[in-house]
Image (cartoon, rainbow, N blue to C red):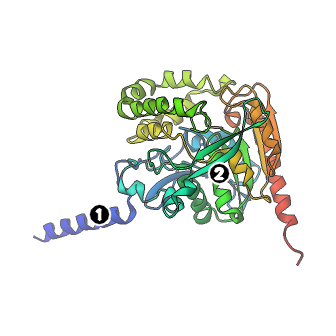
Amino acid sequence: MVVLRRFSSLLLAAACLTFLFGLSSPYTPTPPKISPATNRPNQLYTWRKQQIRYQQAGPLTGEPVVLVHGLFVNSDHWRKTLLGLAEEGYNVYAIDLWGYGYSSKPPSDSPEARAVCGENKRFEKDSTVAVLKNVALGNPNGKGERLRDIELRHPMGSPYNFYTWSELITDFCQEIVPKRPVTLVCNSIGTISALQAVIDTPDLYTGVCVVTPNFRELHSAEIAFPMLSMPVVRKIQQTLREKGQPLFDALAKPNTVKQILKEPYKVQDAIDDTLVKVLLDPLLLKGASNIVFDTLSYSAGPLPEHQLSDFPRDKPVWITYGTADPWTPDARVDALINKPTVEKVVPLPGIGHCPHDEAPELVNPFILDFLQRVLSKQKSNVPNS
C-alpha cells in the first residue's frame, strides 16, 4: 500500500507539473544539446506554457541583438550571423519562432494553442479593425502604388500568426535578454514579426535591420483579381491541409531539400550537409507539417509596406537584399527607401534570398554598421548628467 500511495503521489505530481508548465506534450520536441550548425548549446524558454528553443553567443554584457528567422526554417539558419556578431562583442540571440524548429507546435485548434493567439486581444473587441481599407502597396517595378484592402486576421483563425510571433519576440526580449533596448535583425517573413514587435512596443527596441524583406505573394492583397483568384487559392490551400501529408513526406528528404534550396540560394556552395540537416530535422518532428500547411494558408496579416508607413519615426530601418533573389522584386525593395524610417537599402549583386547564409562576408559588416548606427543614436539621446 505504501508503494501504491507513493506511485500515486508521483503520478499526481507529474500531472500537476504537466498542467502548470504544459511542456510534456508530444508536440514539444527535445532539441539536441548542442546545435550542429553553431556548436552552441540549445537553450529553452518557457513562454505561455510553450517551449521556445533559442541560442545565445557573445558576452552577456554586450549590446543585445535578437535574430528572427524566415519561413519554414529556424534559429540555425543564422549560424554565420550568430557567431559573426558575437565575435565582435555583441550579445546575440537567435530564437525558434513558436511552431518552428524545436519550439512547441501544438495543433492550431487545440486549447493550448488558442490560449497564446496574438489575434485574441487585438481583434476580439472590435472586429472592424481586422481589415485595413485602401492601403497603398508598391508594384513589382517599384513605380506607383496600388490601393488594396488588407485582411489582418488569419483566414483559418490559426494562432500561428504574425501577432503571436511578435508578442513572443517582445516577451523574449523582456524576460531573457538582460540588457535593453534590443536591436532586431530579420530575414524574409521574419521581417513582418519583427516590425510588428517594434510597432507595438517601440521603447523596447533600437531599430530593425532587414536581410531581404518578403512581400507575401499569396496574401489576398497581393493576388491579382482576388475576387476570382482567391477562391481557387483557398481551395488549393484546403486540399494541402487535408491531403498534403504524402506530398510533404515525399519532399522531406535530404536530397530533395538540397534541390529545393537551389532555387532561393544563388551561392550554392552555401548549401552544405549541415544546412540541410538543421533545416530538415525539425520539419520531421510531430506537428511540423501541420504548421507548414497552416502557414501556406495564411493569405492575410500585416504587410511590410504598410508597417513601414506606420513605423515609429525614431526607429531606424536598414535593408539589404540579393539581386538574384527569385522571390523578391529588386525595384520594389529599392522603393522602400521612400518610407520615413528606412535610411538605407543596399542591393547585393548575384546573391539570392538568404544573403546572411550565402554571403556573410557582406551581410555581417552591413549589420555591424547598423548596430553602430543605432548605438550612436542611442548615446546621443542620453541627456547630459
Q: Is residue 279 above or below residue 4?
A: above
Quadrant for the N terminus in the image: bottom left
Please state if 15 lies on the left or on the right of 198 as rendered: left
Q: Residue furthest bottom?
A: 385
Q: Nearer the viewer, residue 255 or 318?
A: 318
Q: Which residue is mark 2?
A: 194
* Pointer 1 local density, CA inside 10 Å: few below 14, some 14–19, many at least 20: few
Amino acid type for the residue under numbered disc 2: Ala
| Residue at 52% over, 62% down | 126
Q: Nearer the viewer, residue 303 or 352?
A: 303
| Residue at 61% over, 43% down | 69
| Residue at 47% over, 44% down | 155
Q: Residue furthest left?
A: 1
Amino acid type for the residue under numbered disc 1: Ala
Quick one: SS at disc 2? helix
Please state if 231 lies on the left or on the right of 348 as rendered: left
Marks 2 and 1, how far apart in space?
36 Å
Q: Position of residue 24 (x, y in %)?
A: 35, 55
* Pointer 2 local density, CA inside 10 Å: few below 14, some 14–19, many at least 20: many
Q: Position of residue 27 (x, y in %)?
A: 38, 48
Q: Which residue is mark 1?
A: 14
Quick one: SS at disc 1? helix
Is residue 83 visible in the rendered image? The answer is no
